[in-house]
Amino acid sequence: MVTLDDSGSVNPRDFQIGKDFVAKLFDSFVMHNENRVSFRIFSSSDKSIFKLNNTLTRAQVQTAVLGTAYRSGSSTMTDLTLDAGVAEFKGIGRGVPKNFLVITDGRSSYPSRTEAAAKRAHAAGINTFAVGIGSVSQSELLIIANGDPNRVFKVENFEELEEILKELSAEICT
């Protein structure tokens, strides 16, 4: 599962670069019936683009990701997307690794809520990863990633996302 920040601090051009990155990341995964992907976006609210129980082909996944509209929300409600992801994983009920990647360019609007939501995700057995872009809170990224620095990736801008693609894909698939 991947969730991409589309708050107001992310401009439309950077959101497009973020979607391109997610599409490439999904393409790097081997996808078959036992290995599903899910895509969400978040800002003032969380929105599911497609869920883990989807039956999309690789081409349909790419089309759905790249066709996702930019919303420019007024806040960064990381807690909402974490909680929505936990609920989605609970609904899938499979005994497979539960990996959840949060990609954000800023500090969440309510850090204490984000911390509580991250703890709920970890308690549910979800492996969380964080990609921070630009001026992000390293401590918040670590909280999202359950304190594991190997699950935290940081780039200075959206253009640098491509540089971490291979390493991130390998870490998620391990």
Image (cartoon, helix red, strand yellow):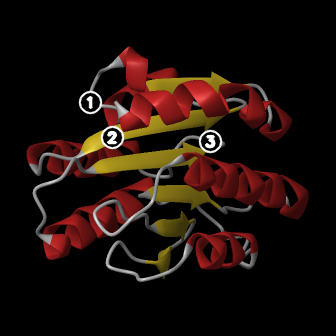
Q: Earlier in the sequence, mark 1 or mark 3?
A: 3
Q: Which of 131 and 53 is in front in this view?
A: 53
Q: Residue 106 carries which label?
A: 3
Determine the secondary structure under disc 2.
strand
Q: Where is 137 relative to 110, above or below?
A: above
Amino acid type indicated by mark 1? Asn
Q: Name the residue under label 1.
A: 146
Q: Where is 124 relative to 73, above or below?
A: above
Q: Position of residue 43 (x, y in %)?
A: 57, 65
Q: Mark 2 points at which residue?
A: 128
Determine the secondary structure under disc 1.
loop
Q: Where is 144 relative to 48, above or below?
A: above
Residue lying furthest top in this view? 149
- Label 3 neighbourhood size at 10 Å, few (<14), some (14-19), many (20+)? many
| Label 1 – label 3 distance at C-alpha | 18 Å
Amino acid type indicated by mark 2? Thr
Nearer mark to the viewer, of 1 and 2: 2
* Residues at circles 1 and 2 in contact by the CB criterion of under 8 Å: yes
Q: Position of residue 49 (x, y in %)?
A: 53, 79
| Label 2 – label 3 distance at C-alpha | 17 Å
Q: Is 129 left, or right, of 112 in this rendering?
A: right
Q: Which of 110 and 98 is in front in this view?
A: 98
| Label 1 – label 2 distance at C-alpha | 7 Å
| Residue 9 makes an appearance in the image | no
Amino acid type indicated by mark 3? Gly
Q: Nearer the viewer, residue 90 or 140?
A: 90
> Who's the residue at 66% across and 27% down the image?
164
Q: Which of marks 1 and 2 is nearer the N terminus?
A: 2
| Residue 113 makes an appearance in the image | yes
Q: Is 136 left, or right, of 56 in this rendering?
A: right
Toward which corner of the image does residue 35 lie, by quadrant? bottom left
- Label 2 neighbourhood size at 10 Å, few (<14), some (14-19), many (20+)? many
